[in-house]
Amino acid sequence: MKLIVNKASDFSLSRSHSVNIVIATALFVGLSGCGGRVANPVKAVNAYDDQLSCDHLRAELQVNQAHILDLNGERAADRQHNVGQLLVGPMFIDLSDSEKKEIKALEARDTVLNGYLAQRCPTDAAAPAPAAPPATAPAAASR
């Protein structure tokens, strides 16, 4: 008994296998970019900074602080999401530090804004901290 090997079919089988590997690799590389988002950091200094009033400076500081809180919440949610993705599919894990980069940029901006606030609005720098409410003794409260 002689074994006859058909070379043409062997070639087509290995070629289709190679094509499948290339397609799978391309899909993996393409989908791996879906895991994170691009950082959008703010500039520390803007061209219009010299035109900002004290109220504008205070308002921008408040907005930046709220944005930092939101980004910290997003970072915490991403960490929980990444743990779940380890079980499902590691290609969707967000390994970017986009939130961290944005937070650092906002903190740098806040430093600049606080400097402007100290220069332009001396009443803000000299304003005393709010007084603590008077403490009541527990014995006096029960009478």
Image (cartoon, grey):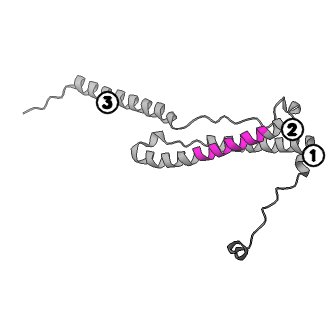
Vertical arrangement, residue 70 with respect to residue 141, above or below = above
Q: Which residue is mark 1?
A: 122
Foreground residue among 68 and 56: 56
Q: Which residue is mark 2?
A: 54
Q: Is residue 28 visible?
A: yes
Q: Nearer the viewer, residue 57 or 105?
A: 57
In three-dimensional space, the C-alpha distance between marks 2 and 3, rounded to whole angstroms, equals 67 Å
User: Residue at point 82% right, 59% down?
Assistant: 131
**Could you say where residue 91 lies in the image, as x and y percent from the top left?**
46, 40
The amino acid at mark 1 is Pro
Q: Which residues are magenta?
A: 59-74
Q: Quadrant of residue 52?
A: top right
Say which label, 1 or 2, has the lower sequence index: 2
**Element marked by disc 1:** helix
Residue at 89% in and 45% down: 118
Q: Residues within 10 Å of mark 2 (few under 14, many from 20)?
A: some
Quarter of the picture containing the N terminus is: top left
Q: Position of residue 58 (x, y in %)?
A: 81, 41
Give me the residue at 44% from left, 29% from top: 26
- Looking at numbered disc 2 in the image, what kind of residue is underneath it? Cys
Quadrant assignment, res 10: top left
Viewer-side residue, 54 vs 82: 54
Most common secondary structure along the magenta stretch: helix
Q: Quadrant of the C terminus?
A: bottom right
Instruction: Determine whether 143 is above or below 50 in the image.
Output: below
- The correct choice, above or below, for 33 with respect to 87 in the image is above
**Among the two numbered marks 3 and 1 on one chain, the one whose residue lies closer to the N terminus:** 3
Q: In the image, what residue occupies the spot 92% across and 40% down?
A: 120
Residue at which label 3 appears: 17
Dots 3, 1 in contact, CB < 8 A: no
Tell me residue 124's x, y (percent): 88, 47
